[in-house]
Image (spheres, grey):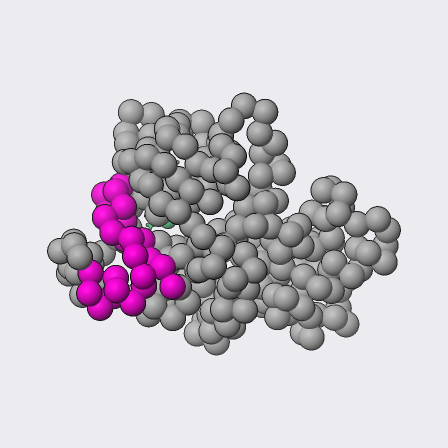
Amino acid sequence: MSAKDVSVFYGDKKAIDGVSIDIPTEYVTAFIGPSGCGKSTFLRTLNRMNDTIPSARVEGAIELDGQDIYRSGMDVVQLRARVGMVFQKPNPFPKSIYENISYGPKIHGLAEGKDELDAIVEKSLRRAGLWEEVKDRLQDSGTALSGGQQQRLCIARAIAVDPEVILMDEPCSALDPIATAKIEELIAELNGRYAIVIVTHSMQQAARVSQRTAFFHLGKMVEYGRTSDIFTNPLEQRTQDYITGRYG
Ligand SMILES: Nc1ncnc2c1ncn2[C@@H]1O[C@H](COP(=O)(O)OP(=O)(O)OP(=O)(O)O)[C@@H](O)[C@H]1O
Ligand SMILES: [Mg+2]
């Protein structure tokens, strides 16, 4: 994906100011920055989740495989399958584990029959590191799982429709350290197969899971580069101040 000179307004208020960034498939990209700097706002522009906020307006261009995702005629439901999203609070459907995964492939016509659907469900759950834990209880409600399992279920649900990009907005902030470690392992395993963007308030997490980091401050992307450079040798004073805990 690539964003060119993207600005986002809520009414008259500018929340994102002229952000340009390429998000390649080869890397996990972390978005960091103090609360309110616009990380979630910018993340949501990447699959047009901002469309659901009436006051939000996006300027600039965002391309997926070279095509403008804001062009008229863009199928937004299709787009959100190609650019999946995982939220801070796990949000499984109040349906069975099986249906949580099979719903997307069904509505997008990705499976011919029951066998194929079963195979997609198994593959997605395996890829999300959840299969062994749930294979004997696929008819149980997704909401009956632990928080960490629910978050992996949501990742499996995103994977099931064969996305190109997975956006994660603080996916571990509601999880304990063990569940967090599992999500981080999962991100490492998915790396390379999908472009992954993760918003995080944890510098340690950004350093562990990402290869590229973008630092946001007051609606601007101040600095973008290799994660190791951002954390050890940032070019900008504001980045330095943030990573050393001077604000945020
Ligand atoms: N739905 C909305 N309507 C109006 N203003 C909004 C809306 N959502 C966010 N904002 C404003 O846009 C700015 C950026 O918010 P955003 O949620 O993107 O920040 P963030 O970096 O994700 O913060 P946090 O780390 O706390 O999640 C803030 O000033 C916020 O108040
Ligand atoms: Mg946010």
Residue 10 can be seen, yes or no = no
Closest to the observer: 89 or 2?
2
Residue 240 can be seen, yes or no = yes
**Res. 247 image quadrant:** bottom left
The region drawn magenta spans 211-234
> Measuring 25% from the left and 42% from the top, which residue is drawn there?
220
Q: Position of residue 186 (x, y in %)?
A: 53, 68
**Res. 201 image quadrant:** bottom left
Farthest-out residue, front? 66
> Measuring 30% from the left and 57% from the top, which residue is drawn there?
225
> Measuring 39% from the left and 40% from the top, which residue is drawn there?
3
Q: Position of residue 205 (x, y in %)?
A: 37, 67
Q: Position of residue 173 (x, y in %)?
A: 42, 62
Question: Does the magenta run of residues contain 229?
Answer: yes
Farthest-out residue, left? 237
Q: Position of residue 38 (x, y in %)?
A: 32, 43
